Amino acid sequence: MATDPSRDLRTLLASRHQVLVASGRDEQRLLELVRSVASPLGLAIWTWTVSRGLAVAPAKGGPNEATYGMSGTRDIAQAIAFVSDSKRHGVYVFLDAGPLLDDPVAVRRTKELAHDPVPGRTVMLTGLGSAVPDALAPEAALFRPKPPDVTELTALLDRTVAGLTRSGMAIRLTPTARAALLDSLRGLTLVDSERLIIEHTVADGVLSDSDLPAIRAAKAHLLSADSPLDLIPTEVPLNAVGGLDTLKAWLVERGRAFEPAARRFGLPYPRGVLLTGIPGTGKSLAAKGIATAWGMALVALDTGRMHGSFVGESEQRLVSALDAVEAMAPVVLWIDEIEKAFSGPGDADGGASARVLGVLLRWLQERPDGVFVVATSNNVNALPPELTRRGRFDEVFFVDLPGPAERASVLAAQLASRGWDPRAFDLSAVVAVTDGYSGAELESVIVSGLYSAYAAGRNLTTDTLVREAGETVPLSVLRAEEIAAMRAWAKGRAVRA
């Protein structure tokens, strides 16, 4: 059940925490939340900004006084000292308090303030990330208000639509699309939600079902900024992925579980798949095809940008990225070659990989609805057993080298994607000489054939493709032992895709 941020904040204030670290991007909503909780308690609300210093507005219901500021408090250390020395009751919200962590004096004064409790006084720091910084632990408590709920978003959508209608805009949302739009806005600030609705309406004067993909993509751009997340274009239809018929049928079935009617039917949201197997067999392409087929944004976790040089930095970056992913729901999260980032315990990196793996495992088990994870792996033996355990993913698929029918499908899809009619070729002849070829190697045969034909000034022919295939040494020959080991692992552990 969703938590009530007002109740959570009220509990923290009643617990007499002197210092809170508030995470989140919605500054305006946070201030409104503080006001709604502090005012009934008779607590004044102070705010600090680097441009203005400390300023106070009396609590709601108090004397009708104008907001006033305290001179000499633009320096954050001096502002903390003022709060500590004055011992005035109130909630002191320090907006964008990042400079505090760069100032040893400010950090020390904050700790001293926490060690000298005054009932009714709380300092709240924003802009420090989604966890309590080590410099303030254990003096500070974390406050993570949940994003706007469906009630708030519905009220916002109704107000925004009414305003757009008065401005002459047309609203053509079906009930299903309206529900999907509200889902798509989850995790955004109210300001960002309103801006997206307006931008995608005024562009053509209409807000319709067809605006949903663009709104989801814009949302993903907003939430992936300054994180190890990349928004991936999703223009690959699932049927463009050759072969993998079992996986495709499974995805078509599971995709319907995102429909609002599925909730009334009692269906849970799909959680994700682990695609293991031989390199070059279409696992990454399948991730793009899933997002396209389901009309969702696709974000990739760049594990190379996730790791940091300081103790705890890698875990913090992953936590922040996963927070952003949750806010993007419904979304497809793609973790490519997952074994490279989460390969289990070891001492080479000071235990960072093990700690990062722990963060990921907890999140996979407890992640909210609407986040579908596609993890791919080329080396299943490097994966820790905990990652492949039931419950982390709905299913584990093994993507083997394509058989004859699948090779024909891959060849046809590759030719068609490059403007060539597959019916003009004897694909059975090409299939016959490409036993043991991966999808990537089949693509390479076609690309090499195109280069050869173009350079010679002639059309691409079956003979050209057969010749190019004969000059290629496939991975199944170069790494036969490794592929045999992968197939042995998959027996009884994974479903053949």
Image (cartoon, rainbow, N blue to C red):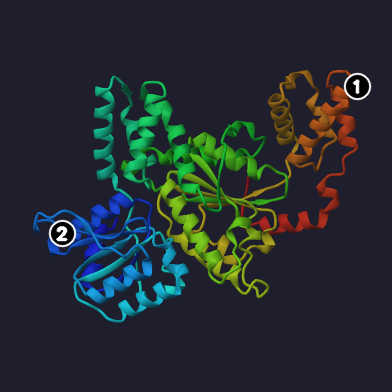
Name the residue that disc number 2 marks: 58
User: Mark on residue 256?
Assistant: none
- Is 3 situated left or right of 353 in this image? left
SS state under label 2: loop
- Of residues 409 and 91, the one nearer the viewer is 91
Residue 325 visible in the snapshot: yes
Residue 426 picture quarter: top right
Q: Nearer the viewer, residue 397 or 281?
A: 281
Q: Nearer the viewer, residue 162 or 462?
A: 162
* Image-based side of 162 in relation to 443, left or right: left
Is 37 placed above or below 188 here? below
> Horizontal and vertical percent for residue 151?
25, 44
* Residue closer to the observer: 116 or 420: 116
Q: Which numbered disc flags the more N-terminal residue, 2 or 1?
A: 2
Q: Residue at x 68, y 73 (%)?
A: 348
Quarter of the image for residue 10 reads: bottom left
Assign a secondary structure to mark 1.
helix
How packed is label 1: few (under 14 Cα within 10 Å), some, or many (20 or more)? few
Which quarter of the figure is the N terminus placed in? bottom left
| 89 relative to 232 in the view: left or right | left
Residue 135 to residue 388: above or below: below
**Circle 2: residue type:** Pro
Number of the label disc, if any, that sits on residue 456: 1
